[in-house]
Amino acid sequence: MRTKTFAVLGALVALAMIAAACAPTATPTAAPTTAVPTTAATTPAPTTAATTGAQTCPLPPEAGATITYSGWSSSTAEDQVNRDAITRFEAVCPGVTVNYVPIPTDYETKMKAQMAGGTAPDVFYINTNILTDFGPTGQLLPLDTLMAQAGVKLSDFIPALTAEFVQNGVTYGLPKDWSTLGLVYLPAAFTAAGIPEPTSSWTYTDLVNAAKTIATKTNYAGFCMAADAVRLWPWVASNGGDYSTSDYKTATLDTTQVTDAATQVANMKADGSLKTPTDLSVSWCGEAIGKQVAAMTLEGTWMISYMQTTYPDVVYKAVLPPSGSVAQADMTFTNALGVNAATKYPNAAADFVFFYTGLDNTLAVQNTGFAFSPHPEAIAQATDPIAKAMLPGGTLPATKPEYWGPYTGALETVVANALDRVFLNQQTVAQSFAQAETEGNNALAGH
């Protein structure tokens, strides 16, 4: 995941074990960016066989190929998943040796230094920061020709997961796992309020009304939400809006679609049916569910292992995000595997990427409970009820990846700050998002 600076870091320690596909500095309050899959609370059980049948090496590897594979290491569980995948790969491509060298801290800084020094690994995790740094400079190997030779297609993957790794028509990475958002809630809060539980056919009006009823009739906060661009985005998208134009050059923050969504949550904050983590004395809204102080929140599949690990006795459920006047929308988070353009073994390195991100290996990983396969056919094979409820959100027509070009993080900071000013009663929605429009255009221009 990309590094993000716009959210509170309070939950980082609590969620260290669930950052399988996150950037090392990502935090749950700021939506995990580009993939925070479900991570097992303990080391996943190894799997050594392909799950859908016999396999052959995707491409003929170079003779005597030995490649190095690196990624940020969030936990011993993630390291075990990678080692098990290597074992499976070497059984399918016995002529290739893979040396796994995890980078537990300062991943992006160390990768830049290694790339500059000519010591970067052959295959490594890429997020949009890495892609922005290495793609335009020719340091990532274009995969399209090798994909065609191996019969690997972008259409093999959930569409929302591949967009950010294709730049100017060139594919630089393939998604290795993913996550998405859902409306997470406590059934007990709805029982206490005497109202029906949410469904995947809910609208945001339904959410607003339920939050107000719960806040009025019970001791639960109705809805938990930080001043966070990612958590606001499904509201915006449900109105048919977005934060920028499709070319990521112009901010669209002072538009009716954005300001209507911001007004909806601002009104909830004003009437007390929406509480921020600070209001509830928690570090993020997932903790508010665990501590049973909020009835609902928009959170992701990373909730599964967080709750299993931290609040195993709390009963909670999830449904898809609500719909708005135009669409039902969700956001996806993923990271990819890419290849060093300077590798001595491009076929072998590409073989590892294609194998690792392929259906067989990612299903084997999914079966451990650690992370979700990026292939659409794998969604139906998820067994956890929270995952089964949330994952279809990744295939909604209006769903998009958390990506607004090379300055995604800067744009998200602008949106988060605008919402924060509203929550703090420093500006009206109209004033704050008019200011954000100017700031957003500067951010997208790299200023």
Image: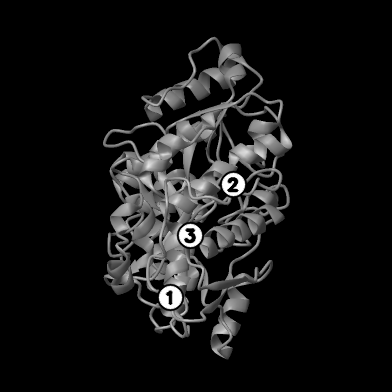
- Give x and y (percent) for residue 282: 70, 40
Q: Which colour scheme is used?
A: one colour
Distance CA(mark 2)–CA(mark 3): 14 Å
Along the line of sight, which residue is nearer the eye, 206 or 91?
91
Distance CA(mark 1)–CA(mark 2): 29 Å
Q: Element under label 1?
A: loop
Q: Indicate which disc residue 61 carries.
A: 1
Which comes sooner in the sequence, label 1 or label 2? 1
For the residue marked with disc 1, what is the amino acid? Pro
Q: Indicate which disc residue 356 carries.
A: 3
Quarter of the figure with residue 347: bottom left
Quarter of the figure with residue 279: top right
Left or right position of 58 against 276:
left
Which comes sooner in the sequence, label 2 or label 3? 3
Left or right position of 74 against 200:
right
Q: Element under label 3?
A: helix
Mark 1 or mark 2, which is nearer to you? 1
- Give x and y (percent) for residue 71: 59, 67
Q: Indicate which disc residue 202 carries.
A: none
Distance CA(mark 1)–CA(mark 3): 15 Å
Q: Residue sitting at 42 percent across and 65 percent down?
A: 57
Outermost bottom residue: 117
Q: Above or below — where is 133 with respect to 284?
A: below
Q: Residue sitting at 48 percent across and 44 percent down?
A: 231
Along the line of sight, which residue is nearer the eye, 81 or 176?
81
- Give x and y (percent) for residue 292: 67, 27
Where is mark 2, residue-wise? 370
Mark 1 or mark 3, which is nearer to you? 1
Q: Element under label 2?
A: loop
Q: Above or below — where is 154 with respect to 382?
A: below
Q: Is residue 32 visible in the rendered structure shown here?
A: yes
For the residue marked with disc 3, what is the amino acid? Tyr
